[in-house]
Image: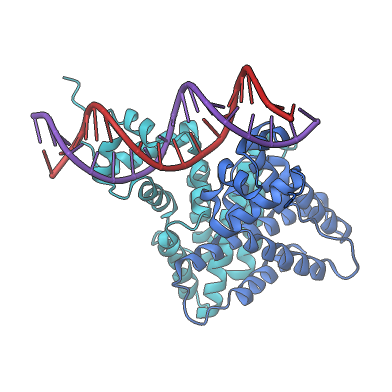
Chain colours: A cyan, B blue, C purple, D red
DNA sequence: ACCTGAACACCGTTCAAGT
DNA sequence: ACCTGAACACCGTTCAAGT
């Protein structure tokens, strides 16, 4: 009785993410992850033969993959709402931010970057402009989330500072230059 | 003979940084750091009583502290050359980028951010504009360096992509909105 | 004051063995 | 095929001891 669901890659990754969100990246260990999955740590290696390194790569892919969805509207409007959603996703999983900044799994952001670049291209920008624009928007997004996470950790956020408003104001400034 | 220089906090931190630059963050261990300092690992605790956590905090402070220097010229020119130098510094020590994105030592960027904000303020911006501008420029800088580091790790950088030129083009777009 | 040596709890991973 | 148990090398850290 108390059958546990079968061990799959997806369940491993989701459980690992849940563990990071709750206890922080430094407390994600193979042994603790095994406990959370109700399995011995060594069982994980059967599904992720390259061990923890592969697990971290999967986590990066899982969180970082967030391409611009198809849709109507101006490029600027679509980027604004896409960026807002991406930011929320990253803030929900701040614990994996240090992983994204690592050089592990360098292709994980490719699809996301490409989707922004394609959108700008469709909106009439040259290839070069679109490349610079996508890189700038994504750079702003990642960097700004990192800064916000630090502020929240500090608990010294100046009274009345509205992170949401500041993010949107900064984003509009960036988009004004590139979209 | 072969006297070794006295063990100091500064020497510990610089040696740790050298170790990260050469072998990567994951290979920075107290024992290896001790070896590099020609000392037992436990000796480090006499200078950094809070151990590795404190060491990492010091590394963040050491690399992230890069305020805009005093000088003449337009706000935009001063920010351009400051940002270029900061980017080089971060790329020279990419191994610590994941630490900066952690919520450790959240005050480490305060002086740097403040210096940008002051510069914008002096250049005639309102307090609110300066706050948004400083946050946006610093966010762009950190995020963009993280993306560049990932591209370099991938070795799949599209032929002919000039990271320097793209950085400057993106920076000019950002500065156009805020400085 | 400054450093060492031994010890402890914990980590990622290998490998043979179980079912 | 899927999971376990024991073992190995390594880690951060404590603490008593040396000088």
Locate residue B7: give its quadrant. Answer: top right
Quarter of the image that includes the C terminus of chain B: bottom right
Q: Relative to residue B20, is residue B103 depicted above or below?
A: above
Q: Relative to residue A73, is residue B103 depicted above or below?
A: above
Q: Is residue A130 left or right of residue B5?
A: left
Q: Is residue A176 visible?
A: yes
Q: Is residue A5 visible?
A: no
Q: Relative to residue D4, is residue B63 depicted above or below?
A: below
Between B127 and B118, the residue placed more toward the observer is B118
Locate residue B108: give its quadrant. Answer: top right
Q: Is residue B1 left or right of residue B144?
A: right
Q: Is residue A97 left or right of residue A114?
A: right
Locate residue B129: give its quadrant. Answer: bottom right
Which percent across, then down, holds residue A51? 34, 46
- Total numbered badges shown on the rendered structure: 0
Between A110 and D3, the residue placed more toward the observer is D3
Between B126 and A77, the residue placed more toward the observer is B126
Q: Relative to residue A16, is residue B141 depicted above or below?
A: below
- Residue at left offset 60%, top offset 47%: B35
Which percent across, then down, holds residue A28? 43, 36
Q: Residue furthest right?
A: B72
Which percent across, then down, holds residue B22? 58, 59
Which percent across, then down, holds residue A81? 50, 54
- Residue at left offset 35%, top offset 36%: A15
């Amino acid at each position: 009785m108390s059958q546990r669901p079968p061990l799959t890659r997806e369940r491993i990754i989701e459980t690992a993410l849940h563990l990071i969100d709750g206890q922080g990246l430094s407390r994600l260990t193979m042994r603790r992850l095994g406990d959370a999955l109700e399995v011995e740590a060594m069982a994980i290696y059967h599904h992720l033969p390259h061990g923890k390194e592969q697990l971290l790569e999967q986590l990066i892919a899982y969180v970082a993959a967030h391409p611009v969805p198809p849709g109507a509207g101006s490029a600027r409007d679509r980027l604004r709402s896409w960026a807002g959603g991406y930011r929320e996703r990253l803030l929900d999983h701040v614990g994996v931010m240090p992983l994204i900044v690592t050089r592990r799994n360098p292709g994980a952001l490719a699809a996301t970057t490409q989707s922004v670049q394609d959108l700008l291209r469709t909106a009439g920008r040259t290839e070069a402009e679109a490349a610079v624009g996508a890189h700038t928007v994504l750079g702003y997004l990642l960097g700004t989330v990192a800064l916000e996470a630090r502020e929240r950790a500090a608990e010294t956020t100046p009274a009345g500072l509205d992170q949401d408003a500041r993010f949107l104001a900064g984003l509009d400034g960036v988009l004004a230059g590139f979209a």
